[in-house]
Image (spheres, helix red, strand yellow):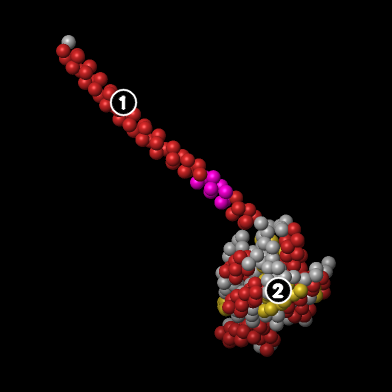
Amino acid sequence: MKGFKKVLAMLLAVAMVAAMVMGCSGGDDAKEDAPKDDAQTESTDEGGEDAAPEDDTQAEALKGGGSNIIYIITPSVSNPAFKAEADTATAKAKELGYEVKAVSHDDDPTKQTEAFDNAIADKAAAIICDNAGADATIEAVKKARDAQIPTFLIDREINEEGVAISQIVANNYQGAKAIAEEFVVAMGEKGKYVELLGKESDTNAGVRSSAFHEVIDQYPDMEMVAQQTANWEQTEAFDKMEAILQSNPDINGVICGNDTMMQGACAALEAAKLNLPVIGVDGSDEAAALIKEGKATGTALQQFAVIASMAVEQADKYLKEGSTGLDEKQLVDCIAITKDNVDKLSGFVFTE
């Protein structure tokens, strides 16, 4: 009996201690939890209040810098494609009632930054830009955005989304594949060929080359014997083609990343008294003339005029309505131009 009482006493003692600990612990937690809950609620409320304006700010349309000026920034207009962009965008902007400042960055990111800075200083309403580098352009577009100036990119994309309002580009992949198929036919599905690549900093150069090869590499009897960069330039393409011909006099065809390089390649082939299948991409009048003369096989028309006009129309709508109503990234299909339809091409415009 004594043993039982002793055990009972010990159990009662343990229960009392446990109750005291739980009571003290519960009291402290209650005291601490209340402020924590209040603080968390306050923090959530404050966070909610802060988050809403941030979301609203991000959702709000850029208002423009305050002037009625649209800046049109392109590579050198010595290239007919970029001249078509600048001329078409300028005409459309003036038609819609804007003042226009058209400048060239000459594919120099520093010059492009200066052009964006000038647009910001002029409180531009919007910027239309065929950019000078997929990475090099991002900060300039962000800076314009911070100044409430929306940017509409044409022809070339940048490597970031959500910065520009629109990125309207030709479907280079589709176009290059389409004209590569014409090249394969002209080559009879066999033979040695050469590739002249565009500027490495331009995403279009890689896209077009990949599309060319997706088609051509399916044919085991077609062999690429040389591949060199000519940086989109006609003179450089002529020089590179001459040098390639010295080491590969038995080539059967040439693929070029753009029409300007195609012009240089065709001139070098003509100087060497060769007439081979040659393709390009752009859809210039100069390329059309070569096709008509039988000196080139074809080109993929990038609808520069259409793209430039679209960008200005979207800028105007955005400034007036706060939205383009379209996705940021937009692809405009190319048209394969050969001797069969070249007569319908003029000034980068294809007329059915």
Find the magenta span and give its range. 43-51
Q: Residue at x 75, y 80 (%)?
A: 286
Depth order, front residue of 24/232: 24
Q: Which residue is mark 1?
A: 19
Work out whether residue 177 or residue 9 is closer to the camera in this orientation and state it: 9
Figure label count: 2
Can you see residue 188?
Answer: no
- In the rendered view, tell whether residue 36 sits above or below residue 321: above
Which residue, as the protein is rendered here, is positioned at the far left?
2
Task: Give how far across and how far down residue 347 sits, in percent.
Answer: 78, 75
Q: CA distance from mark 1 to mark 2?
A: 79 Å
Determine if residue 272 is in view.
yes
Element at badge 2?
strand
Query: On residue 72, which mark appears?
Result: 2
Q: Nearer the viewer, mark 1 or mark 2?
A: 1
Residue 241 in the figure: left or right of residue 314: left
Is 47 within the magenta?
A: yes
Q: Residue at x 50, y 42 (%)?
A: 41
Mark 2 Cα-neighbour bin, 10 Å: few <14, some 14–19, many ≥20: many
Which image quarter: residue 111?
bottom right
Location of the C terminus by quadrant is: bottom right
- The image shows residue 189 at horizontal and vertical percentages of 66, 69
Quadrant of residue 217 within the rendered picture: bottom right
Give residue 295's position: percent from left, percent from top.
Answer: 73, 81
Q: Secondary structure at mark 1?
A: helix
Amino acid type, label 2: Ile
Q: Which residue occupies the foreground of this view, 104 or 185?
A: 104
Q: Quadrant of the N terminus?
A: top left
Q: Name the main secondary structure of what is drawn in magenta.
A: helix
